Image (spheres, grey):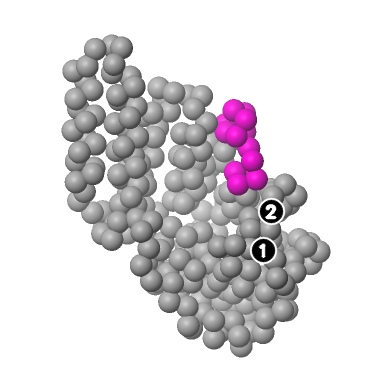
Amino acid sequence: MTHSYFAEVHASPSSQLSGDGFIPPDSPAVNSAWEELKLTTAMDELSAPAARREALLRLAGALGFQLRYAEEISMLSALIDEFPDDAALIRRRAARELTTLRCKAALKDFARCAELGMNGPDTVYRVGIARYFSGDYEGAMRAEEECFGATDEELGIGAIYWHTLAAWRLGAEPSLLKERYRPGMKVGHHFSYDRAMSLASGTMSEGDMKALIAAEDDDLEYPMIAYGYARWLINEGRKEEGGALLKEILKRDGFWIAYGFSGAWSDGNGNADGPRR
């Protein structure tokens, strides 16, 4: 399925997650933003700061649209150096750092956002994911519990999903799943999380899950459902099957910025035993 979230020709996951892989040439939007940035050097002292900020924002956005997140992070960092208390810029950088598994940097930025008053459920939710990818499963569970207690069911189902997966990694009770999940939650666009938790709760049969994954043609939804199923398999003691599914997720990288894909990558490119870094 086609999405408009990013350019058709975009950076490969390996180029952003391990530093080697395809990076597309500059798009017209990137070239235009670079030219605009160059012009700011000739401006007077009063005009230059605002113009430079706007040009850097345009450049960051153009690079991000090509999924060149490492370069976007660099542009955002240049901006944050000039505007160190801009919570929106820091939050945006944190999101890119999380997607590219720069989890320590992401957590530092999320903490700074909290200091600046930007610490709503959406941010806490991503703190939990960053901790999960870092292997801090207890911290991930705490963050997702905090998120769930302060949000609606649409984001709440995501909190249940990552809380459950973290609990499984610890051999702990997935209390949010047991106590707060129910069929028919108002999950909005997070229906793939709901499907995975339907299996985890016993509401959906494994046969139905297999059929669902086999029929899923959306590269955004597939990794979210499949990663939850892979971790369920591993939690059930079926590590070989779970590991094989993690590898299948990595092969289908049409929407590699999905957190389910990041989860498979952080598990070691198909290694079911734990995070790679």
Q: Earlier in the sequence, mark 1 or mark 2?
A: 2
What secondary structure is marked by label 1?
loop
- Residue lying farthest to the bottom in this orientation: 207
Indicate the quadrant where residue 208 lies.
bottom right
- Drawn side of residue 250 relative to residue 194, left or right: left
- Drawn side of residue 142 relative to residue 65, left or right: right
- The answer to whether residue 103 is visible is yes
> 219 and 3: which one is in front?
3
Q: Disc 1 designates what residue?
A: 186
> 3 and 227: which one is in front?
3
Image position of 38 with respect to 95: above or below: above
Image position of 255 with respect to 51: above or below: below
Tell how many labels: 2
Q: CA distance from mark 1 to mark 2?
A: 8 Å
Q: Main secondary structure of the magenta part?
A: helix
Image: magenta residue range = 112-124
Residue at point 28%, 61% (across, down)? 8
Residue 247's spot in the image, x, y percent?
46, 73
Residue at point 33%, 50% (across, down)? 65
Q: Are marks 1 and 2 in contact (CB under 8 Å)?
A: yes
Residue type pointed to by label 2 = Asp
> 146 and 174: which one is in front?
146
Residue 86's spot in the image, x, y percent?
49, 27
Residue at point 22%, 16% (across, down)? 43
Residue 10's spot in the image, x, y percent?
29, 57
Q: Disc 2 designates what residue?
A: 152
Residue at point 49%, 34% (across, down)? 88
Residue type pointed to by label 1 = Lys
Residue 116's spot in the image, x, y percent?
59, 28
Q: Is residue 219 magenta?
A: no
